[in-house]
């Protein structure tokens, strides 16, 4: 099971990190962060869908076609943990060595611009600026940053693990052959 978890966890991590890397290279004032968010979560869903492949393969090749909900869920959640750990590590490396500050500033500018375009009052804009500045200050704490980043990807994997375990569980056949 370790080999299956590691292989599919690494595949899922790669599928999430590649779009994240491209997004980070493209992010700036001209980049639409809403589209980036959609692409990011879509890549997480695609990446963690490898859980279905891993559970089915493990069930069919290692367990003679039989797997409990618990074992299927265990495989899925372990793949999620591998992918999440690598995702968080990648983000921490990027955010401490590169353009996270510039990206956050561009995101803030774009959010304020959208608020104004949607007709927000100056009080609403100022409240949003204060909220975002407070978040930026909180986000400087590495523990908070790790937690927030982990909570971006882990719930997606948790949900997919539950669905995969429910759909792919298979009990031993109890049909007896008449003699």
Image (cartoon, rainbow, N blue to C red):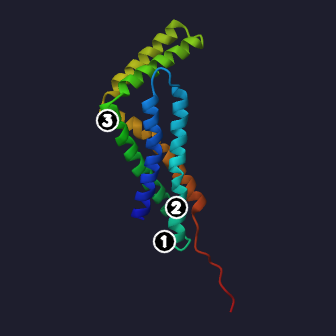
Q: Nearer the viewer, mark 1 or mark 3?
A: 1
Picture quadrant of residue 141? top left
Residue sitting at x 46%, y 35%: 22
Residue 143: give its label: 3
Residue 97: give its label: none
What's the distance in space between the residues labelled 2 and 3, CA to CA?
32 Å
Q: Is residue 36 above or below residue 80?
A: above
Q: Position of residue 147 (x, y in %)?
A: 37, 37
Label 3: which secondary element? helix
Please give left or right for residue 14 compared with residue 32 in the image: left
Label 2: which secondary element? helix
Residue sitting at x 42%, y 53%: 10
Please give left or right for residue 92 compared with residue 109 in the image: left
Residue underneath mark 2: 55
Please identify the quadrant where the N terminus is shown: bottom left
Q: Is residue 5 above or below residue 41?
A: below
Is residue 88 visible in the rendered image? The answer is yes
Residue underneath mark 1: 62
Residue sitting at x 34%, y 42%: 89
What's the distance in space between the residues labelled 1 and 3, CA to CA?
39 Å
CB contact under 8 Å: marks 1 and 2:
no
What's the distance in space between the residues labelled 1 and 2, CA to CA?
10 Å
């Amino acid at each position: 099971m370790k080999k299956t978890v590691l292989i599919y966890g690494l595949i899922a991590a790669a599928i999430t990190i590649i779009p994240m890397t491209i997004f980070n290279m493209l992010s700036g004032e001209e980049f639409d962060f809403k589209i980036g968010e959609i692409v990011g979560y879509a890549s997480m869903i695609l990446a963690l869908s490898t859980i279905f492949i891993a559970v089915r393969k493990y069930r069919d090749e290692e367990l003679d076609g039989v797997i409990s909900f618990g074992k299927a869920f265990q495989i899925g959640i372990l793949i999620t943990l591998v992918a999440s750990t690598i995702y968080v590590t990648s983000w921490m490396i990027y955010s401490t060595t590169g353009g996270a500050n510039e990206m956050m500033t561009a995101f803030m500018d774009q959010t304020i611009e959208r608020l104004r375009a949607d007709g927000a009052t100056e009080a609403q804009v100022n409240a949003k600026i204060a909220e975002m500045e407070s978040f930026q200050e909180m986000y400087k704490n590495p523990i908070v940053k790790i937690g927030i980043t982990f909570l971006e990807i882990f719930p997606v994997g948790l949900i997919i693990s539950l669905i995969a375990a429910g759909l792919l569980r298979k009990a031993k056949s109890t049909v007896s052959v008449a003699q």
